[in-house]
Image: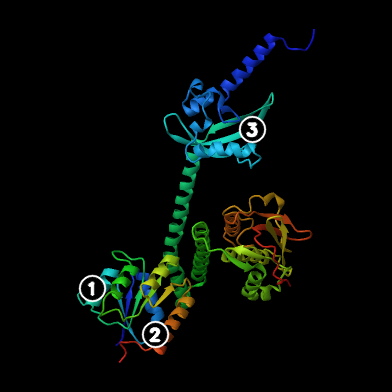
Amino acid sequence: MKKILLVEDNPADVLLTRRVFAQADIDAEIVVAEDGVTALEMLAGTTEPKVSDPVLILMDINMPRKNGKDVLKEIKATTRLRHIPVVMLTTSDAREDIRESYENYASGYIVKPARLGDFMKAVETLKKFWFETVTLSSDD
Amino acid sequence: MTDTPNSADQASAASVLQAILDTTVDGLITIDARGRIIAFNKACERIFGYAADEVRGRNVSCMMPEPYHDEHDGYLERYHNGGEARIIGKGREVRGLRKDGSTFPLDLAVAKVEVDGHVLYSGIVRDITERKQAEAKILLQNEELGRFAFMASHDLKEPLRSIEAFAEILSLDYADKLDAEGQNYLEILMSSASRLRAVVNDVLEYSRLDTDLGSAEEFDAGKVLKQLRDELRDQLEQTGGQVTMEELPVLRGDRVRFYRLLQNLISNALKYCPPERQPEVHVSAALHNDFWQFRVQDNGIGIDPEYYSVIFEMFKRLHTRDTYSGTGIGLAICRRIVENWEGEIWIEAAPENGSVFCFTFPATTGMISGEGT
């Protein structure tokens, strides 16, 4: 089964994202990394569960140990990983965060919507684009 | 008896004058047309650290750091030859140079005096070091407060989003498991969270107003208002409201902020209208010398003149939440936006019902857009 790596330290947001993804009926398993360092270890296969080739990475920005922007930079600097689309999913709507993310090759930037309905709409759009429209390099 | 003063009287008057000069808190320096010091009172001795005898006859530029030092003679000469007066007759903030080499900020006011056909200049000097330090401290504290408001409101957003989302999930998935009282509590929870979000967003926006300055561009105020009217279409249809305008000017500045200002003022005008009345908002602008004065007139409930001066203050609300909702920050945001382009904002009573919010915007062109309807 396809895997989505969700890098998110807030358990409430993990629960919420899982619920909205399930509701959107996205055909992929969500694997959670609780912070940036763990995410990189899971991608490198040094920490369980190993997620060596997810179809998509959803990345929070404000996290302990290593923030999402730094994790993004490391992923894009790693030949084996740089083809994986990384979509930032964060509360921050600061201009510098948005700009810096795109400068470091983020594939998208979603400000976590306040309302559940809006979050659902954002995830539906995500699904349409990444799972129904584009062809990913890891697709068979 | 005559009124002609005798020499004893003259001597006494001179001593009185000298005593006044010596006890004046502000420094007084008198120079001749070539800039040489003629008189230097006690306050000047204290301010500059020189004794009067040390400086009498010297050029006053010895108490000026660069660039004033080198420019002073040239400045006096230009002024004598009919040039522009930068300080004389006006007053200005400059820097002074003490005997020990240290410099300090001072307020300087210079007057031209003519005695027996000789031109003299008399300067009043006030050391404003403490005032400048206090100003710098206030500025720093304001910056810190701004950063604090930004961080606090930013960090509040995340838990608040969770509260809202999970309350919504409860109401969607578990409402039928709650009795009427439980459902009431849930509704209170949701409406409180949503009100808190409005406050947090407004505080965040307010705290960003001084830092996230947009770039200046030329824009058509009429087009901005039309764009806003399109955005408000649903609200206008629901209330039967109308937004009309006269021909508005082409401006140069921060278009996004200008849009936000009109959005706040017009949304208020639509909101604060008695339910039985259809809201009417009319926007006009008139050129006054070097600025445009905009008027946003409504037919709403109006504002008691008693509150005209406080309505732009933060968290100032004139109505209960049950009557009209709001965060009490909207007009404070408006004032801050207008202040950022060095304009003014105020309120006037409308001729019949309602209020007129007026604000100014610097006029860079006298152009009218022709977008009025």
For the residues bearing labels 3 and 1, Cβ distance under 8 angstroms: no
For the residues bearing labels 2 and 1, Cβ distance under 8 angstroms: no
Q: Is residue B354 left or right of residue B12?
A: right
Look at mark 2 in the image and give the residue it sits on. A130
Look at mark 1 in the image and give the residue it sits on. A41
Q: Position of residue B197 (x, y in %)?
A: 50, 64
Disc 2 to disc 1, C-alpha distance: 24 Å
Q: Amino acid at mark 3?
A: Ala
User: The C terminus of chain B appears in which quarter of the rendering?
Assistant: bottom right
Q: Nearer the viewer, residue B180 or B200?
A: B200
Q: Nearer the viewer, residue A11 or B18?
A: B18
Label tally: 3
Disc 3 to disc 1, C-alpha distance: 76 Å
Give whichever of discs 2 and 1 has the lower sequence position. Answer: 1
The residue drawn where x is 59% and y is 22% is: B21
- The circle drawn on residue B48 is none
Disc 3 to disc 2, C-alpha distance: 76 Å
Q: Amino acid at mark 1?
A: Glu
Considering the numbered disc 2 on the image, is that residue within a helix, a strand or a loop? helix
User: The N terminus of chain B appears in which quarter of the rendering?
Assistant: top right
Subunit bearing disc 1? A
Subunit bearing disc 3? B
Q: Name above or below for residue B24 compared with residue B238.
A: above
